[in-house]
Amino acid sequence: MSPETDVSVSAPSALDAATDLLQRVATGDQRAFSELYDLITPRMLGLVRHVLKDHAQSEEVVQEVLLEIWQTAPRFDPNKGKAVTWMLTMAHRRAIDRVRSAQSSRDRDTKIGIRDLGREYDSVSESVEIRIEHERVERALTKLTELQRQAVELAYYGGYTHSEVSTMLSVPIGTVKTRLRDGMIRLREELGVAS
Amino acid sequence: MNRDADDVMTDEEFADTRASLGLAVPPVTPSAAMKDAVMARIAETPQDAPQPAAVAAAIEARPDAVGPVERRAQARWFHRPGSVVLAAAAAVALFFGGVLSADLVNPAAGDAQQLAAIVAAPDVQTVSSPIEGGASATLVSSETLGVSAMVFEGLPQLTEEQAYALWYITDGEPTPAGLFSVGDDGTVVQVLEGSFEAGTVVGVTVEPSSGSPAPTTTPIVAIATA
């Protein structure tokens, strides 16, 4: 079992163009931004809507992120990380901020974070590449223990805090922290992504 | 943000892993109107200046470099809209004209070291603004330290009779914060005199080299803090 063999699976990707595009955007190139928009917006909207559920609110959040990308592109340093990671991180952070600030949304179905990601595919036609990547992550998630997987999914997709996850899974908060960290380390190994 | 509570979800070492989780979610097609709206907004939104080399060097030199603190600091300047700076410029233009008690002394050396100390502060705030003519100004401040520094790049040299003047503007009251000049390379790291308070505006004007009792010119840049 060598995680290195997995790396090649994710090698050529349409998203690889993101770094070049972002660097052109950094020079004020609006045409490059238009291309970057087409490339990244459906991915960010998918993630944000998965967290927030509400489509209109999700579009609002993604618009804010896109504006932030435009403004801060000159600050992006390709030596410090991938453009896609940089952009997805912003989108995820904003989605989590939004979900946590809206207390009314706390009555969200507690299973939101741990439901099957695959179900949403039914209504969307996807490229083979996205399918493969999706299945790669799904497969990696199955390598986690049940508690690790639930903790990771609740924290990442649900935006729940450690203490909320602790309550939801009925385990001590210290255990949640340990499982989360162990889970992320395992995932990183399985995905073969070196940070 | 509570670092302890969010460790794994904010740690830089898991950034790519989190992104993979994000990309595993099926894409959703945005509404057609959304792109038009976004393109219209970016067309009228100024971009940040690239991070000045002096600030980048200070961050690199920090003992805990590339930690969550830095990310938080970045998050702050990422969120600073250009319109705030424009509004601040208007405010400064409006309030400059009051009488100032002038005690303008050129700060001593060691500004780069002080900049490093500010950058290392847990509440460091960084705001950048372009200056007409292609230069840029970056204000790096910490309320707990009560200190701020301005970092300029590409700033043109003045005549011998002129100097750049820094001002703290709090509640509309400008207070002199030092004079400085620019060398050949146009790069300046200047720690402001006086105490920095959150919410203050930092302005820069061109004055006679002996200093002015009050700002006599329109500010070349003004930066608001939160």
Image (cartoon, coloured by chain):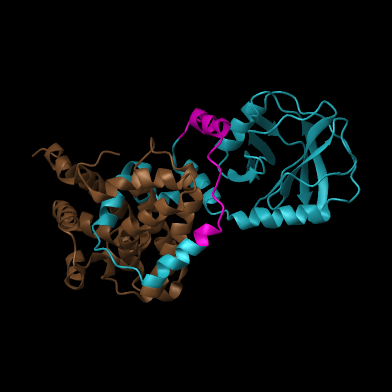
Chain colours: A brown, B cyan
At horizontal 35% and vertical 44% (from top left) the residue drawn is A19
Give the side of residue B173 with respect to residue B142, left or right: right
At horizontal 11% and vertical 37% (from top left) the residue drawn is A2
Which of A138 and A127 lies nearest the eye of the viewer? A127
On screen, residue A182 above or below A111: above
Residue B141 shown in magenta: no
Residue B59 shown in magenta: yes
Which of A21 and B149 lies nearest the eye of the viewer? A21
Q: Quadrant of residue B68?
A: top left
Please state the extent of the stretch shown in magenta in the rendering. Answer: B41-65
At horizontal 14% and vertical 51% (from top left) the residue drawn is A143
Q: Does residue A99 appear in this view?
A: no
Give the side of residue A47 with respect to residue B47, left or right: left
Of all residues, the one furthest to the left in this rendering is: A1
Give the side of residue B212 with respect to residue B144, left or right: right
Give the side of residue B209 with respect to residue A44, left or right: right
On screen, residue B126 above or below A50: above
On screen, residue B171 above or below A1: below
Spot occupied by residue B114 in the image (x, y as percentages of width and height): 64, 30
Q: Quadrant of residue B205?
A: top right
Which of B51 and B178 lies nearest the eye of the viewer? B51
Spot occupied by residue A127 in the image (x, y as percentages of width and height): 18, 60
Spot occupied by residue B6 in the image (x, y as percentages of width and height): 39, 52
Q: Does residue B225 appear in this view?
A: yes
Q: How many discs appear?
A: 0
Spot occupied by residue A151 in the image (x, y as percentages of width and height): 26, 58
Q: Quadrant of residue B155?
A: top right
